[in-house]
Image (tube, helix red, strand yellow):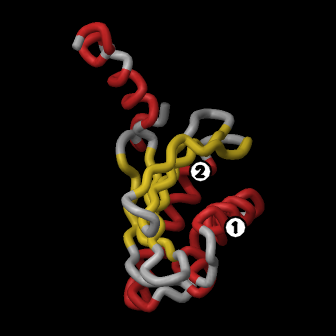
Amino acid sequence: MLSKHKGLLFICIFYAALPVFGQIESDEKITDIFFKTYKQNPSKAYTDLFADNKWMKDKKSDIETIKIKMNDFLSGLGEYYGYELITEKSAGDSYVLKSYLVKYERQPIRFTFLLYRPNNKWQIQNFTYDTNIEEELEEAAKAYRLKNNW
């Protein structure tokens, strides 16, 4: 485990429809497009999330800084092996959280997408990545959390 990167690494919140992703009628396609690009070029996949977000126009230097840190972090993980859906939760039909295990040679990381459909088109509402997976699994396995101890 990369100890200096424990916990939440970076949070990137954005609140508007993105033309790159926002014209999509299915929340599934947003993550499919992201991971298809991510496989070839993680930096581009991350940049595309913010491509035409009018709320992020004044944050270009922040986006670039986070992208550099993300690329530096990812370069220490070895080979990329793909991703798996961990969970999907929703609040109604128009607000969906999707969490993915992103598999690397050294360790997994988690990508979480919050998707929102204010009208008839889906958009990215929030994107985070972190390395808390190991800690959360260990916490979930503690005796006081086991069903027969309730």
Q: Residue at x 47, y 36 (%)?
A: 2
Q: Residue at x 53, y 43 (%)?
A: 109
Q: Is residue 103 left or right of residue 16?
A: right
Residue 65 appears in the rendering:
no
Other residues around mark 1 within 10 Å, as few (<14) / some (14–19) / many (≥20): some
- For residue 101, above or below residue 49: above
User: Does the CB distance between marks 2 and 1 fall below 8 Å?
Assistant: no
Q: Is residue 48 left or right of residue 1?
A: right
Q: Quadrant of residue 39?
A: bottom right
Quadrant location of the C terminus? top left
Other residues around mark 2 within 10 Å, as few (<14) / some (14–19) / many (≥20): some
Q: Residue at x 51, y 43 (%)?
A: 87
Give the residue type that dot 1 points to.
Answer: Ile
Nearer to us in this view, 141 or 46? 141
Checking the image for residue 33, the label placed there is 1
Q: Which residue does the numbered mark 2 point to in the structure image?
A: 74
Marks counted in the figure total: 2
Of badges 2 and 1, the one in the foreground is 1
Element marked by disc 1? helix
Element marked by disc 2? helix
- For residue 3, above or below residue 75: above
Q: Quadrant of residue 31?
A: bottom right
